[in-house]
């Protein structure tokens, strides 16, 4: 089905053409003066120059062609030459019925589905998840879902940071604490117990401890560097420990991501890319891209049009060790080999932008990707506390994700118990569901690239532009529908009739914009557009609800029409929040 605005533009274009003008002027937009009209066309203004005519004269000619319009109930010229448009209620109702029949709510599925890898999450093994990783998970998950909804093959990869100094630090600290472990025995051959010699809580305590020590004690730091090096060379005892660290850590990460309703198709890690490094580097050398500079191996990536200095991409340090850049390049090699993606999208903190500029340029220049493969970087801003500085605990430490979630759930629980009479057990579960909406909506309603302030009070409020407000609206709809069913009503009968009042028409017009909105949110990788949209839909629904008697409507056909519209509203809202990565409870 053609989108509602496309249908309008078609009619306007035909009118321009019949009046003797170029049809391309027949574009229609949502009115920026909703007090005056519902939609508008500014084509006459745009055409004035080409036709050496006053815009209102063109507009008059066009409007004359719209007298027997299928779509518009009013087309009016206003000076200097805008065409103000209102839509026929019958047309909108018909559109609603078609949208309701369509499984995808009239969103068109991509004609040429693309394979897109999204690299998001990016936690570092053995370090606790902190709020910095929250944004990547939330934003990446949403873009993945939107991409799938519009018909692409989207592969989400968590890309674990498992190959850095943190591993050497943990091994070193373990060696100091438990030197008797078989893993440190030089005769260790590789047979070892399945159970790890530490728990997740120990691990989480070991890393910051070791990291602190290494900053103060140079010998300790060197020991950790050496351990990292030995691990990367495959020393059996260290490999065994690495395996334990991975198992314990990944189990914990999976639990954390599951709590966030975030789900990865791939649990690949930086170490998986290591086998690709030697050949890749050799090839870049052989083809003259990589050269030695002060002992290090680098590839130039600056371009003439650069306005700021882009340093060369470093492949190997002078001691032969590879770097974050090398790993990311080798990961591209692996991804091209395994999945032949059309696009790889990285959802990472925007402070890593330079790194990705270097990686992308190097990958293109050296032909690691096909010319048509898109490499994109969605750099997100920082999540700040109310003081405008990066989010911290009350004591000033790094906030762990689990604690942050616990804080929100607690506040949500307090509000739910205070506002309503829900049973205690139910209130706890409900608080979790609503709490997740508070966190995710609070994040996603901002443009991803911007910093934002994490405000527990505001995010958990049932009023205003918040997740809980959206869920509250959905719950309100569900409860009306339930009551109708309990009274013996059948939700499958009836169809949507032309709107009976302005607020119902407004709700229908809002709903009709769903398809265009989703497609645009995908094009621009902008989940915040979904948030802005469902906020408008919720407001429109609540106005309609306050002005209209629904269940007490006496005319059965009219009542069924209302209930069909409610079901459509619910589907639009529930589909939208699913694209954002959360869901609604039955009660709240
Ligand atoms: N582990 C990295 C960090 O915490 C993020 C990884 C992002 N993805 C990538 N392919 N580099 O900073």
Image: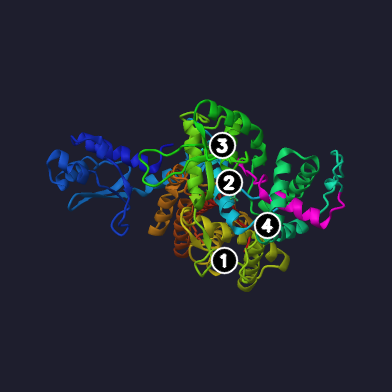
Point out the residue furthest to the front here. Answer: 294
Quadrant showing the N terminus: top left
The one of 299 and 244 positioned closer to us in this rendering? 299
Q: Tags 4 and 3 in contact by the CB under 8 Å rule?
A: no
Q: Position of residue 525 (x, y in %)?
A: 47, 45
Q: CA distance from mark 4 to mark 3?
A: 31 Å
The residue mark sitting in front, 1 or 3, is: 3
The residue mark sitting in front, 4 or 2, is: 4
Q: CA distance from mark 1 to mark 2?
A: 26 Å
- Is residue 91 in view from this perspective? yes
Q: Which numbered disc, 1 or 4, marks the residue that appears first in the sequence?
A: 4
Residue 8's quadrant in the figure? top left
**Residue bearing mark 1:** 460
The one of 52 and 155 positioned closer to us in this rendering? 155
Q: Which numbered disc, 4 or 3, marks the residue that appears first in the sequence?
A: 4
Category of crowding for the residue at label 4, using alpha-carbon neighbours closer than 10 angstroms: few (below 14), some (14–19), many (at least 20): few
- The answer to whether mark 4 is within 8 Å of ligand 1 is no
* Mark number displayed over residue 221: none
Secondary structure state at the residue bearing disc 4: helix
**Residue bearing mark 2:** 120
Secondary structure state at the residue bearing disc 2: loop
**Residue bearing mark 3:** 329
Q: Which numbered disc, 4 or 2, marks the residue that appears first in the sequence?
A: 2
**Residue bearing mark 4:** 218
Q: From which residue to which does the magenta span run?
A: 153-181
Q: CA distance from mark 1 to mark 3?
A: 41 Å
- The answer to whether mark 2 is within 8 Å of ligand 1 is yes
Whether 194 is drawn above or below 31: the answer is above
Category of crowding for the residue at label 3, using alpha-carbon neighbours closer than 10 angstroms: few (below 14), some (14–19), many (at least 20): many
């Amino acid at each position: 089905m053609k989108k509602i605005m496309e249908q309008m533009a078609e009619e306007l274009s035909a009118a321009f053409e019949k009046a003797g003008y170029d049809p391309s002027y027949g574009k229609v937009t949502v009115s920026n003066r909703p007090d005056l009209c519902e939609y508008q066309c500014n084509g006459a203004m745009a055409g004035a120059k080409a036709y050496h005519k006053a815009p209102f004269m063109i507009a008059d000619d066009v409007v004359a062609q719209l007298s027997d319009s299928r779509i518009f109930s009013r087309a009016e010229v206003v000076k200097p030459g805008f065409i103000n448009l209102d839509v026929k209620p019958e047309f909108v109702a018909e559109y609603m019925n078609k949208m309701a029949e369509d499984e995808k709510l009239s969103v068109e599925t991509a004609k040429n589905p693309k394979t897109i890898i999204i690299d998001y999450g990016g936690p570092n093994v053995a370090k606790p998840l902190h709020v910095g990783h929250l944004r990547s998970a939330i934003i990446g998950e949403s873009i993945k879902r939107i991409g799938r909804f519009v018909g692409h093959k989207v592969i989400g990869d968590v890309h674990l940071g498992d190959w850095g100094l943190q591993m050497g630090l943990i091994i070193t600290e373990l060696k100091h604490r438990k030197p008797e472990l078989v893993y440190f025995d030089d005769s260790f051959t590789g047979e070892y117990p399945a159970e790890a010699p530490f728990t997740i809580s120990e691990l989480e305590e070991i890393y910051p401890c070791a990291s602190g020590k290494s900053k103060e004690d140079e010998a300790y730091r060197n020991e950790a560097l050496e351990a990292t090096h030995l691990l990367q060379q495959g020393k059996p005892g260290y490999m065994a420990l690495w395996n334990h660290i991975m198992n314990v850590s990944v189990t914990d990460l999976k639990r954390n991501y599951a709590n966030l309703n975030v789900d990865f198709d791939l649990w690949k890690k930086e170490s998986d890319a290591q086998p690709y490094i030697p050949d890749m580097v050799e090839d870049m050398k052989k083809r003259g891209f990589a050269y030695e500079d002060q002992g290090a191996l680098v590839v130039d990536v600056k371009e003439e049009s650069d306005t700021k200095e882009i340093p060369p991409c470093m492949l190997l340090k002078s001691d032969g060790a590879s770097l974050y850049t090398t790993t990311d390049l080798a990961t591209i090699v692996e991804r091209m080999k395994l999945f032949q993606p059309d696009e790889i999208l990285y959802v990472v903190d925007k402070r890593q932008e330079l790194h990705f500029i270097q990686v992308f340029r190097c990958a293109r220049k050296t032909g690691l990707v096909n010319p048509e493969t898109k490499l994109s970087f969605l750099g997100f801003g920082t999540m700040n506390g109310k003081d405008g500085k990066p989010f911290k605990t009350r004591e000033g430490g790094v906030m762990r994700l689990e604690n942050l979630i616990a804080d929100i759930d607690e506040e949500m629980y307090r509000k739910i118990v205070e506002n309503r009479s829900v049973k205690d057990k139910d209130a706890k579960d409900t608080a979790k569901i609503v709490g997740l909406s508070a966190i995710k909506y609070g994040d996603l309603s901002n443009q991803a690239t911007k910093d934002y302030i994490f405000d527990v009070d505001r995010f958990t409020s049932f009023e205003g532009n918040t997740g809980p407000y959206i869920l509250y609206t959905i719950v309100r709809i569900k409860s009306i529908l339930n009551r109708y069913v309990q009274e013996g009503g059948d939700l499958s009968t009836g169809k949507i009739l032309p709107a009976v009042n302005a607020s119902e028409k407004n709700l229908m017009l809002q709903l009709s914009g769903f398809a265009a909105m989703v497609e645009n949110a995908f094009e621009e990788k902008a989940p915040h557009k979904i948030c802005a949209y469902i906020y408008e839909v919720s407001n429109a629904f609540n106005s309609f609800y306050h002005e209209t008697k629904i269940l007490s409507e006496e005319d059965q056909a009219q009542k069924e029409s209302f209930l069909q519209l409610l079901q459509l509203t619910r589907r639009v809202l529930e589909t939208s929040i699913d694209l954002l990565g959360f869901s609604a409870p039955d009660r709240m």
